[in-house]
Amino acid sequence: MREQTSNYKMINERPSREFFRFAFPSVFGMIAISSAIVIDGIFIGNFVGAIPLASVNLIMPFITIVWGLILMFASGSAVIAGKYLGEDKPNNACDIFSKAFMIVFMAMILLSIISYNFPEYISYALGAKDDTVGMCVEYLKNIAWFYPVFGFAVLMSFFLRIDGKPSYAFFDQQLTQNFKIIQSAMPESSFSLIDHTPDWSKMIFKLEGGEQAGEYIMFANNSFSFLAASRAKVSADIVNPVSEYSYKARDGLNIPTLLTYPKGKTKQKLPVVIMPHGGPESYDRISYDWLAQYLASRGVLVIQPQFRGSKGFGIDHLLKGRGEWGKKIQNDISDAVIALSKENMIDPDLSLIHI
């Protein structure tokens, strides 16, 4: 049974169901933001004064324009990038992100310059008079420094939702290509960039996963060299391998999963411990997980399912977990045992869940 895409569901599901699925998160988000504004207003009005509260309210239309521009570029570019990712065109998606970042960054710099250098004109245009002018000017000058930060935060929040497996990307296409080569050299491992030279000719990474307990390596001249071990007393020969796996839940949804195998054991009829992550909107990454390693050293296969609602696997996978705690999320976890049992990899009678 294949996984249904968002477009497929929007065409075939009941319109009312799809409306609520997309509308409710947005409505709740707006309520949360509005509540924060109301609380800020109560605080300013009661503890700072009526004139400061009036000044903030006068400036609010300008702030709304700033937020509107950020959301317009962020949401629009994320939709286009998501379309390219769905068409298996990651380079096009990266190009959209780079362009969106530059547009948002330059727009926020321009608005920061306007807000900082012409606060009086903006204040008068918005209706400020007498005592409110000075405070409006002060507010505009202070908040102007943060427009680029706001823009970056919102843009990243949209793009991280649609990126099924976040990695490094750069404006320099050659540098991005170099990173893809580095990651493809060790596909079962997780890379974290620690440091680099100004010209990027030498880069230091922390390497985890696979059969590494954590190593610092340097990439230079198209080759790797070992620098140090993050866990010097844990040798590679006792590290149990970690690999990616996926299975279909009972409703056809694809569930990405991490498996830690007991080293040296035949992958048949193994006892199993399922270790679902917390959150539930979180995820497990390829790394040296001491508990999973301990259990695997005792001959146990460890399953870490990225059930629906987990972050980092696309917006659709994340939203499918809303309202499903103890329901379909629990089914996803149980279905891991069913899927691996069918492959004769585990013994379902020797299965436990760690919470």
Image (spheres, rainbow, N blue to C red):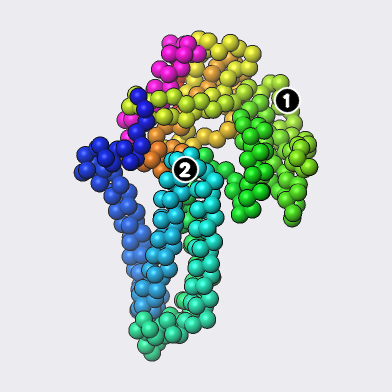
Q: Quadrant of residue 231?
A: top right
Evaluate whether residue 94 shows in this view.
Answer: yes
For the N terminus, the quadrant is top left
Where residue 206 sits in the image (x, y, percent)?
68, 39
- Secondary structure type for disc 1: loop
**Mark linked to residue 235:** 1
Residue 190: quadrant of the picture: top right
Asked if one can make out residue 149 in the rendered structure from this viewpoint, the answer is no
146 or 39: nearer the eye? 146
N-term mark: 2 or 1: 2
Residue 330 located within the stretch drawn in magenta = yes
Work out which quarter of the rendered image holds the C terminus and state it. top left
Residue 56: x %, y % from top left: 39, 75
Residue on which the image places disc 2? 85
Identify which residue is drawn at 77% across, 43% down.
Answer: 220
The stretch of residues the image draws in magenta is 324-350
Is the residue 184 above or below the residue 62 in the image?
above
Between 45 and 194, the one lying in front of the other is 194
| Residue in the picture at 58% in, 19% down | 261
Q: Is residue 154 magenta?
A: no
Question: How far apart are labels 2 and 1 at the CA level?
Answer: 39 Å
- In the visual, does 325 lie left or right of 194? left
Q: Residue at x 60, y 12 (%)?
A: 265
Tags 2 and 1 touching, CB below 8 Å: no
For badge 1, the amino acid type reads Ser
Question: Residue 68 bears which disc, if any?
Answer: none
Q: Is residue 77 above or below residue 204?
A: below
Report the number of discs: 2
Residue nearest the observer in this picture, 32 or 89: 89
